[in-house]
Amino acid sequence: MQGLDIVLKYFDDFTPNQLKQLETLEGLYKEWNEKINVVSRKDIDQIYLHHVLHSLSIAAIVSFKPGADVIDIGCGGGFPGVPLAIFFPETRFHMVDSIGKKLKVVEAVAEGANIQNITTQHSRAEEIKNKKFDFAVSRAVAPLKELWTWAKPLLKKEHKNEINNGLICLKGGDLHQEIFESGTRPKMMSVFEIFGEEYFKEKYIIYVSK
């Protein structure tokens, strides 16, 4: 199963506009990846499985409410934030990375796919002031201890979503030592149990509640 079909295997309630946005992602990423390499060469042909569906595993465990604010820490080329912004059009996604050229790709993809609910900031997460969010999301950016140190001060106190405000990150491999060193007590869910694709074996969603 190739392309967008792999996403539609697990999600079937997209609006025509969301479908159009999802369809345009492959072409936009292929075009921009030639200029600024944000997706590995072997992954670019599997963008819907390796990147879009992987990002949407977060949507399988939490439904962000309209008006929620989510920060994507170290967003790179836009995962998980870009697919989540398509999935939750009434949630605001603030994409942050310390490497400016990666944000250029995010901005170009958001414009090309007409995604209206994305803002970007060229910054390190720990340097962000005067902004608060309901959730922080991240994918394979840093050890959990660091991610939680960055995310915790950015989270709003009051909870208005179905789960408490917190950090939701996508990680792979044996995470026991990393979780132990973080001093947190996260919930850990297997992506493979959500999407039964071979690629997701050893991939997990980690949720740390504020």
Image: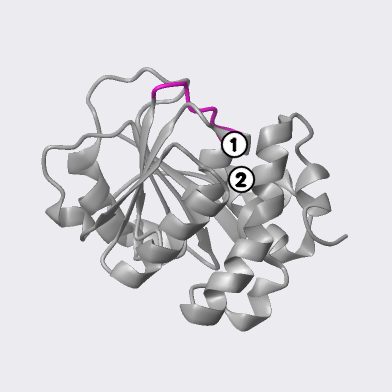
Q: Would residue 65 be counted in the magenta stretch?
A: yes
Q: Is residue 151 left or right of residue 108?
A: left
Q: Which is closer to the viewer, label 2 or label 1?
A: 1
Looking at the picture, does residue 157 appear above or below residue 153? above
Q: Residues within 10 Å of mark 2 (few under 14, many from 20)?
A: many
Q: Position of residue 137 (x, y in %)?
A: 41, 47
Q: Earlier in the sequence, mark 2 or mark 1?
A: 2
**Residue drawn at (18%, 37%) of the image:** 131
As rendered, which of 70 and 4 lies closer to the eye?
A: 4
Q: Quadrant of residue 98?
A: bottom left
Seen from the viewer's position, the closer of residues 187 and 24 is 24
Whether pointer 2 and pointer 1 mark residues with C-beta atoms closer than 8 Å, the reply is yes
Q: Residues within 10 Å of mark 1 (few under 14, many from 20)?
A: many
Provide the residue designation for mark 2.
56
Q: Position of residue 199 (x, y in %)?
A: 72, 65
Q: Secondary structure at mark 2?
A: helix
Towards the viewer: 100 or 74: 100
**Total marks in image:** 2
Q: In the image, 27: left or right of 177? A: right
Magenta highlight: main SS = loop
Q: Which residue is tagged 1?
A: 87
Q: Amino acid at mark 1?
A: Phe
Q: Residue furthest right?
A: 1
| Left or right of residue 203, residue 122 in this image | left
Three-letter amino acid code of the residue under disc 2: Leu
